[in-house]
Image (tube, rainbow, N blue to C red):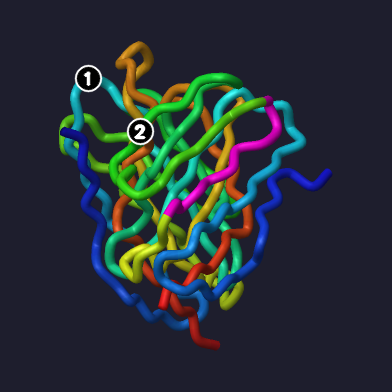
Amino acid sequence: IAGITQAPTSQILAAGRRMTLRCTQDMRHNAMYWYRQDLGLGLRLIHYSNTAGTTGKGEVPDGYSVSRANTDDFPLTLASAVPSQTSVYFCASSPLAGGTDTQYFGPGTRLTVL
Amino acid sequence: GNSVTQMEGPVTLSEEAFLTINCTYTATGYPSLFWYVQYPGEGLQLLLKATKADDKGSNKGFEATYRKETTSFHLEKGSVQVSDSAVYFCALGPYSGAGSYQLTFGKGTKLSVIP
């Protein structure tokens, strides 16, 4: 059982370039999330999806977009990367939407924007 | 809005020492509370959780009790091991029906256990 996979593991990107971070889960969870982790700031929610076909904005959505065409995949796109988007990005999922449910995290993508 | 405050690290302990990591929260209603752990180079994984007041979550020798009167969820372990070295995050989830699905995380506390 793979759980959640993320790709790439790490990436160095020139500012202004477009980048899509991939996230796939095989647990048939309804809800999925994207977080960024920055030193001293903990994890902050970028976007979420309660179920396939729906998405919502989290705490720090600017500069990012997501789609949820099916249950398993939840890609995160940076349309035009900027250095402040240098961070570690974690995808997560939970069986149901809502704050009482355990979230399961992927291994992360380390992104550096130069 | 919701917020979580946890003690700043890093925390360095000798093996078999007692561990406390403080966590307090501000929230509307009756949130669920979580401790997540992040081992080096890995994603976060749930350590324990409590969904209502006075509940005690426990796992791998760690415990935390949901204290509504003090709005706290302190993490404790009686005897830490080197393998417990990690970053620990306290998190808060909105109460059911709030219409929000966001977990609010503390900034994390790095624990190093030395032999």
Q: What is the chain identity of the residue bearing mark 1?
A: B
Please identify the quarter of the rendering in which residue A25 is found: top right
Identify whether A103 is placed above or below B108: above
Q: Magenta stretch: residue A11 in it?
A: no
Residue at screen point 48% across, 79% down:
B113
Instruction: Inspect the image, locate mark 1, and give the three-letter code of the amino acid beneath it.
Output: Gly
| Dominant SS in magenta | loop
Residue B99 place in picture, x, y as percent: 33, 16
Q: Residue tagged by mark 1?
A: B29
Which mark identifies residue A49? none
Whether residue B92 sits left or right of residue B113 in the image: it is left
Splitting the image into 4 quarters, where does residue A100 fall?
Answer: top left
Rendered residue at 39%/27% (across/down)? B101
**Label 2 CA crowd tier, 10 Å (few <14, some 14–19, many 20+):** some
Residue A41 coordinates in the image, percent (x, y): 28, 61
Q: Residue furthest front?
A: A16
Left or right for B69, reference B114: left
Element class at badge 2: strand
Q: Residue at x 38, y 81 (%)?
A: B12
Which type of secondary structure does the marked residue at label 1 adopt? loop
CB within 8 Å, label 2 to label 1? no
Residue A77 lies within the magenta run: yes
Range of residues picked out in magenta: A70-79
Kind of residue sitting beneath label 2 = Lys
Foreground residue among B48 and B94: B94
Please give the chain letter of the residue carrying mark 2: A
B62 lies above or below B97: below
Q: Where is residue B53 in the image (x, y as percent from the top left)?
A: 31, 25
The residue shown at (58%, 59%) is A108
Instruction: Give the residue at the far right of this rendering.
Output: A1
- The location of residue A110, given as percent across then percent down, is 53, 68
Q: What quarter of the picture does the C terminus of chain B occupy?
A: bottom right
